[in-house]
Image: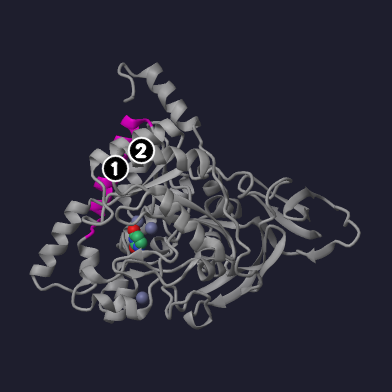
Amino acid sequence: MSLLIRGGTVVNADMSRRADVLVDGERIVAVGENLEAPAGAQIVDAGGTFVMPGGIDPHTHMEFLFMGTVSADDFEWGTKAAISGGTTTIVDFCIPGAGQSLIDAYREWRNKSEKAVGDYSYHLAITSWSDQVEREMGEIVNTYGVNTFKHFMAYKGALMVDDDILFRSFKRCAELGATALVHAENGDVVAQMQNMFISQGKTGPEFHAYSRPPEVEGEAANRAIMIADMAGCPLYIVHTSCKPAHDAIARARAEGKRVFGEPLIQHLVLDETDYLNKSWDHAAQRVMSPPFRPKVHQDSLWAGLQAGSLQVVATDHCSFTIEQKRMGLGDFRNIPNGTGGLEDRMPVLWNAGVNTGRLTPNEFVAVTSANAARILNMYPQKGVILPGADADIVIWDPKATKTVSAKAQVSRIEYNVFEGFELTGLPAKVYLRGRLAAESGQVRAERGQGRFVARPPLPAFAQAQRLWKANTAPKAVAR
Ligand code: DUC
Ligand code: ZN
Ligand code: ZN
Ligand code: ZN
């Protein structure tokens, strides 16, 4: 089955050109002017549109058992929501339960994702340390197609790991050609501040935000950067939400360190006023970690995307229903942390980024798809319109409009943090490996159509870092 997408402007991260795109089966086979349609090919008129690689959201939590409940969107509904908004691949966090081995957690995630509508990959979380964990990290990288390990520096008593584990795990990442990821918040400070507010009778959702100020994120980001540098591994800081964390990343990069930063679409367009003088439900629905910030931090994140010191825009999609959020009535510490956003990420970013001149269409492709593919090692299978790549294609109509409404969304929750946003620029058609997967937001792809995307190790960063250290520094890098 072949498909010819004719007359659009192909937009990749590095260039745009008027070109047709020919797809055969699941792959792109040609990109060029006036391509001939093979006999029987389906022809799609893309005049007046941008033809872009399918979006990649590098940070989601589907069907995640967290804070005593399970996030509401599973792999079926989460990937459906993603596809309706132009995102054809997600990278979810595979997080072992207490005492669960990495391999068992990986198998559990493979089972959960069999129903996915779109493509998916995983990061594996390191939540404890033992010889077995160290050994299994090697298996995960070398046989299971996962080259990234996540570390929570917050959630004390649950997922948090201390500096001892960070340094051990980061050194192991360096050895394996894996990249370390961190949730950068100082969990000890957060726990003390939470308890202080509760003991003062301050139980409302706004105190969730006050207990996690930008300083706790900036401190943890700086600490993770220094530890990763000593271990010699590349570092990716998830949900970079504030200026102190962004400054740490920009400074590290200026010093030659391989450090990446991932702002969320929520932090780019929403701010702390959502917690203030709002109903309990409104505020609690927006409780996530890190919390929404004062506006000044947004300016820093946008500047980072423009300058390239921040590379990817994600969602941390971890949705909870109103009833689930109400578990925290009377104590903000029990509000399940997380918001949705998968189906809105690309349209909201286009609207707030491209329509305002903060991002070019090429930069939009870079931060919604190509950079994630490169950093996580799925490029050029994903993240580019190029012969040989998977035919994950978004035909983007820059004139289409909609008003965001939870009533019309795919996600299984009853509200939307972007409710009422008026957007211009939407995906008209979305293809997943050559098959029409969504049209004007209506999902056509089916349960089980998604595939696991294996991501082999990427030893170049760690090797370069070791070589550079050996050549420039008097003392060698650890190990
Ligand atoms: N933050 C959230 O808000 N939800 C999931 C996990 C996280 O770190
Ligand atoms: Zn996190
Ligand atoms: Zn609001
Ligand atoms: Zn997360």
Q: Left or right? Give the position of 342 relative to 475.
A: right
Mark 2 and mark 1 lie on one chain; the one further toward the N terminus is 1
| Label 2: few (<14), some (14–19) or many (≥20) C-alpha neighbours in 10 Å | some
Q: Position of residue 99 (x, y in %)?
A: 30, 52
Q: Which of 263 and 431 is in front in this view?
A: 431
Q: Nearer the viewer, residue 448 or 29?
A: 448
Residue plotted at (82% across, 64% down): 43
* Disc 2, SS: helix
Q: Where is residue 42 in the image (x, y as percent from the top left)?
A: 83, 64
Image quadrant where one finds the N terminus: bottom right
Tell me the residue that label 1 is attached to: 129
Q: In this view, does 129 lie above or below 340?
A: above
Magenta residues span 212-232
Task: Tell whether label 1 touches label 2 (CB within 8 Å).
Answer: yes
| Label 1: few (<14), some (14–19) or many (≥20) C-alpha neighbours in 10 Å | some
Q: Nearer the viewer, residue 21 or 360?
A: 21
Q: In this view, does 194 lie above or below 406?
A: above
Q: Label for residue 134?
A: 2
Q: Position of residue 226 (x, y in %)?
A: 29, 35
Residue plotted at (30% across, 67% down): 272
Q: Is residue 417 above or below residue 433?
A: below
The amino acid pointed to by label 2 is Glu
Find residue 393 and report its image quarter: bottom right
Q: Left or right? Give the position of 205 relative to 171.
A: left
Secondary structure that dominates the magenta span: helix
Q: Can residue 238 be seen in this view?
A: yes
